Image: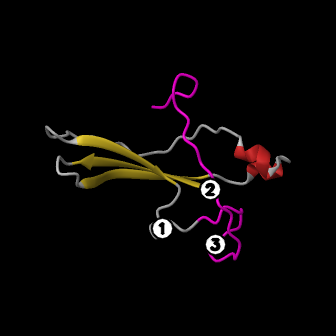
Amino acid sequence: TDVIVRLCDVYPDGKSILISEGCYRLGVLGYQKGKTREELNHLIRELNIDLWATSMVFAKGHAIRLSVSSSNFPRYERNMNVGLVGGNAGKIQIAENKVYMGEKHPSS
């Protein structure tokens, strides 16, 4: 599956402007290590998604939005979640992604 993170400046009127984004494509290493799909569905992974060096002064009334998604087509090639290269591989698997946070799973 893919994890797309977008950092945005949200204007007081609700308009959202992209500042920076990053993408991380998780591989199929779990299958190579003998894990079943069920085991992979419950595996928690720490990801480091680079939003590049970013500096921004937010105007009064603006807000910061961090958007997490599993797709940004057509900017990035579609990921069919089956470990095959190319968006036209013919097979599709729905991925269920969760974002964990809090004391046990801090983020930065």
Instruction: Look at discs 1 and 3 and give the one toward the viewer.
Output: 1
Q: Quadrant of the N terminus?
A: bottom right
Disc on the earlier residue, 3 or 2: 2
Asked if 17 appears above or below 98 in the picture, the reply is below
Name the kind of residue labelled 1 in the image.
Answer: Phe
Name the kind of residue labelled 2 in the image.
Answer: Thr
Tell me the CA gap for discs 2 and 1. 13 Å
What is the span of residues highlighted in magenta in the rendered image?
A: 79-108
Name the kind of residue labelled 3 in the image.
Answer: Gly
Disc on the earlier residue, 1 or 3: 1
Crowding around mark 2 (Cα neighbors within 10 Å: few <14, some 14 to 19, many 20+) is many
Residue position marked by numbered label 3 in the rendering: 86
Residue position marked by numbered label 2 in the rendering: 1
Query: Where in the figure is residue 74, as x and y percent of width and height?
Result: 46, 70
Query: Where in the figure is residue 60, as x and y percent of width and height?
Result: 13, 37
In the rendered image, the residue lying farthest to the left is: 60
Residue position marked by numbered label 1 in the rendering: 73
Circle 3: element type: loop
Is 102 left or right of 52, judged from the image as shown? Answer: right
The residue positioned 82% from the left and 51% from the top of the image is 32
Circle 1: element type: loop
Query: Does the magenta-highlighted stretch encompass residue 91?
Result: yes
Crowding around mark 1 (Cα neighbors within 10 Å: few <14, some 14 to 19, many 20+) is few
Question: Taken as a whole, is the magenta stretch helix, strand or loop?
Answer: loop
Asked if 7 appears above or below 76 in the picture, the reply is above
Query: Where in the figure is residue 14, as x and y percent of width and height?
Result: 22, 51
